[in-house]
Amino acid sequence: MFTLAHISDPHLGPLPEPSGLQLANKRIFGYVNWRRNRKGVMTTSVLDDLIADLKAKQPDHLAITGDLVNLALPQEILNAQKWLQSLGAADWISVVQGNHDAYVPGSRLKAEQSWLDYMASDQHLANHINFPTMRTRGPLALIGVNSARATMPLMATGYFRSNQAQRLAEQLIHAKNQGLFRVVMIHHPPAPKATHWHKRLIGASLFRRVIQQHGADLILHGHTHLNTRTTIKGPETEVPVICVPSASQNPGGHKPASAYNLFHISGEAGNWHCVMQQRGFSKPGDPIKDLLHVSLL
């Protein structure tokens, strides 16, 4: 049995006070949104409690599907690096970036360099990441797709292009030939009509075609801050697509409260079993508890 934990969208706080120059771009819109809608709604105390509960379950590996920061300020990126180091060793945590981690031009590369050890493939060149990445942990192949890039103000779209599609296909084939359970990590949801137009994954149909042709066993994403389970078509069976709420979301708000998922994976190639266990907050004042047990495979 191998247990994989999944969290997403922690939007780490507190937000460092930006300078006027740092707000002279798209960040001004995100800063206003943070002060109006997210400050006090997404809190460090909720995230800390969730992580403490997660660690007590002793999963074999942790997947984080993006949006570690809010405005991709240099200090935020550094704080996120320190937070990752406090969570655990880089070989225990796999990260892909979200749109907030690539908020303005240049921030994605800065985050990649800062979080390199948590993102790069097992075999990689120093200070360079070639997406998608692949990390092998136990019976799992963790394949990290990058959908994050800087966008225009008021847009939060993600991108999946042909260069990643070709490499993703190669990695899915390689992992299948190795008899591995294939987990694809991406920030933006790849299922049809999963989010609003200005937050969608551009190239989602291309992503789905790769999965339809080559298959996968599990797809994890974030971005919507919702608790959703859907599927997309594989060559033989439907592939589960799972989103988890923001890891720092206070209970009692408009979005689902902070939660994490545990995937208990057993079996072997051709006969995999995967049970999803969700733990998190349900309502204000209640402790973290089991919310769901469901068999995915």
Image (tube, rainbow, N blue to C red):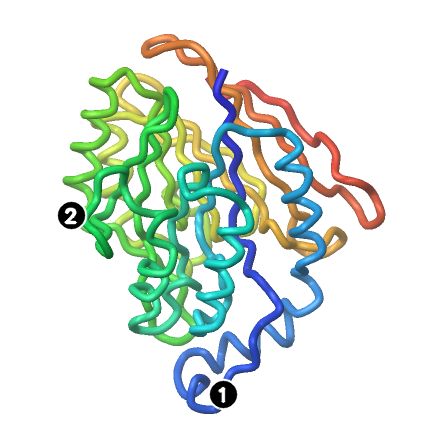
**Is residue 169 rendered to the left or right of residue 200?**
left
Whether residue 139 sits left or right of residue 80 in the image: it is left
Picture disc at residue 270: none
To which quarter of the image does residue 57 belong? top right
Q: Position of residue 115 (x, y in %)?
A: 38, 55
Q: Which residue is tagged 1?
A: 19
SS label for mark 2: helix
Work out whether 296 lies above or below 171: above
Residue at 36% across, 65% down: 102
Tag 1: Cα neighbours inside 10 Å, few (<14), some, or many (≥20)? few
The answer to which of marks 2 and 1 sits earlier in the sequence is 1
Left or right for 25, reference 168: right
Q: Could you tell me how far apart the alpha carbons at marks 2 and 1 are, in whole angstroms?
A: 38 Å
Residue 243, placed above or below residue 70: above
Q: Is residue 5 left or right of residue 251?
A: left
The x and y percentages for residue 12 are 56, 61
User: Which amino acid, by three-letter code, is at mark 2?
Assistant: Ser
Residue 246 at x, y percent in the picture: 58, 51
Where does residue 79 sit, x and y in percent of width and height? 51, 64
Tell me which amino acid carries mark 1: Ser
Q: Is residue 206 visible?
A: yes
* Marks 2 and 1 in Cβ contact (< 8 Å): no
Is residue 238 in sight in this rendering? no
Residue at point 54%, 78% (across, down): 31
> Where, by quadrant of the figure, is residue 103 drawn?
bottom left
Instruction: Check disc 2 and report the residue beneath it.
Output: 162
Q: Nearer the viewer, mark 2 or mark 1?
A: 1
